Image (cartoon, rainbow, N blue to C red):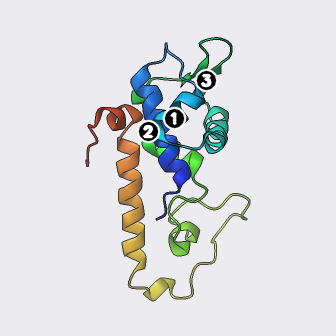
Amino acid sequence: MFISTRSRYGLRAMVQLARNGQANPLSLSGIAKEEEIPIRYLEQIFGRLRSADFVIGRRGPGGGYVLSRCASEITLLEVIRVLETEFFHTDCVLQCPDFKQKEGSPKGRIPCCSREDRCPTKKLWTDIKVICETYLRNNSLADLSNGSLEME
């Protein structure tokens, strides 16, 4: 599993928005300064977040960004899936039919590793992926911003 700076920065910026409330927009320059994130990189991140309808931009004096919905309704997994190209990069877990198929692939079985039927580590990687996704799905942006993440 590899979590990029895009996700780390994106989640930190989203926490800033969650803590600030939906009525008070924050500027990207303010978030960038507070979180020590390069503004150009933050603009790219917010492009993705805006396209996925997680944030709304408001123009003009006092403008900036707010969350498009309540922080308790946005799961951490949703945010990471928008910001990461492949959240859990282990080919056997990504390609095997136990999990969703890659976009554009033909229906049916996707060829997996030649060792699939006898691999001693496949279950380990599969279980870790499920545990990570469950944890991120069960915790919201509000949980992260309040410091109340749960392991359930």
Residue occupied by mark 1: 33
Q: Residue at x 58, y 70 (%)?
A: 95
Q: Could you classify mark 3 by the number of other residues whose Cα lies within 10 Å: few (under 14), some (14-19), or many (20 or more)?
A: some
Mark whose residue sits in front, 1 or 3: 1
Could you say where residue 77 lies in the image, as x and y percent from the top left?
46, 46
Q: Residue at x 45, y 40 (%)?
A: 12
Could you say where residue 123 lies in the image, as x and y percent from the top left?
38, 74
Q: Nearer the viewer, residue 74 or 38?
A: 38
Residue occupied by mark 3: 56
Under tag 2, what secondary structure? Answer: loop
In the picture, the disc for residue 13 is none
Please determine whether, in this image, residue 39 is positioned above or below residue 134. above
Q: Is residue 119 visible?
A: yes
Q: Nearer the viewer, residue 43 or 90?
A: 43
Q: Quadrant of residue 118?
A: bottom left
Q: Amino acid at mark 1?
A: Lys
Residue occupied by mark 2: 75
Q: Amino acid at mark 2?
A: Thr
Kindly check if marks 3 and 2 are in contact, taking CB atoms under 8 A apart as contact: no
Q: Could you classify mark 2 by the number of other residues whose Cα lies within 10 Å: few (under 14), some (14-19), or many (20 or more)?
A: some
